[in-house]
Image (spheres, rainbow, N blue to C red):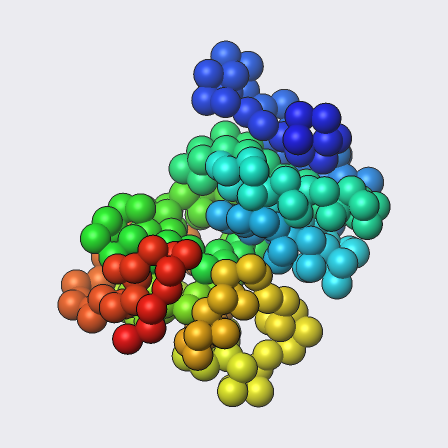
Amino acid sequence: MSGYPHVFQYPFSVLQEKGFEMKGRWNELFFRKKGPIVLELGCGKGEYTVGLAQRFPDKNFIGIDIKGARMWSGAKQALEKQLSNVAFLRTHIELIHAFFAPGEVSEIWITFPDPQMNKVNKRMTSTRFMKLYREILNTNGLIHLKTDSHFMFTYTREMIKANRFPVEVETDDLYHSGLADEILSIQTFYEQQWLSRGLSIKYIRFVCEPRETYIEPDVNIEPDAYRSFNRNHLHVV
C-alpha cells in the first residue's frame, strides 16, 4: 500500500518526530473538493468507507485501521473506482488526535467492533473513546454504531443514557425495522457472516455532545455467548 497515493501510514516514531502535515488541512491539501469529513474507525476491509463515498460524493471519507493487509482491499477498490473522496489511514485509533484538528470531523462510523467485554478502556464506545472523539468532532458530531453484539449495543445505550447524548436513530433489529435504507444496507464482510448465522444487526446513531465530565455506566450486561468462539469458527448459542 506504500505506493497508493490515498493511503497514509505513519508509525508513532514518525509522528513524534515530524507530526502529520495535513492535520487540520485534509480538505485543503488532499481532497479535491472540500466537504464534511467522515471517518470509519476499525474499517477492516473498508467496505463502508468505499460504499459511503460512492453514495455521498459531496463528503470526504477516511477509513482507519492498524491492519494494512485488511485495509488493502478497500484501498484497491477506491483506486479502481477512481474515487477522489476516499483516503485510508493506517494507525492506532488512540492516535487520531494527531491526524485531525479540533472540529475537523463531522461523523464517525464504528462498524462491527470487538465488544471488548472484559476491557472497558478498549471498548470503542467507552467514555475514554468519547473523549478522544470529542477532540476532533465538530459541535454536532455524529457517531454511528452498527454491531451484531447484544453486549456492545446494550453497553453503548447505557453509556449514551448516562451522559445524556441525544439519540437520532436506534434499533436492535435493523433489517426488520424498516430502517435499512440505502446507507445502512451496506454490508461488511463480518456483517454477512453474522446474518448468515441468524444474528440480528443493531444500529444506533447519536450526537456526541461536549461534556465537562463523562460518566461510565454502572451496569451488569450478559456477555455474548458466541464471542467465546473463534471468529472463524462461530457457533451461535
Q: Quadrant of the N terminus?
A: top right
Residue farthest toward the front in the current orientation of the protein: 233
* Residue 100 drawn at (x, y percent): 56, 36
Instruction: Identify the residue shown where x is 57% and y is 55%.
Output: 107
**Residue 163 visible:** no
The one of 198 and 123 positioned closer to us in this rendering: 198
- Residue placed at 33% from the left, 64% from the top? 152
Where residue 176 sits in the image (x, y, percent)?
A: 51, 87
Which one is in front, 44 or 123?
44
Query: Is residue 219 depicted above or below 49 in this figure?
Result: below
Residue pictured at 54% horizontal, 82% vertical:
175
Quadrant, the C terminus: bottom left
Choose between 67 and 89: the one closer to the eye: 67
Classify residue 151 as left or right of residue 166. Answer: left
Asked if residue 157 is positioned above or below residue 102 in the image, the reply reads below
Residue 163: percent from left, percent from top: 31, 62
Q: Note whether 107 is above or below 169 in the view shown.
A: above
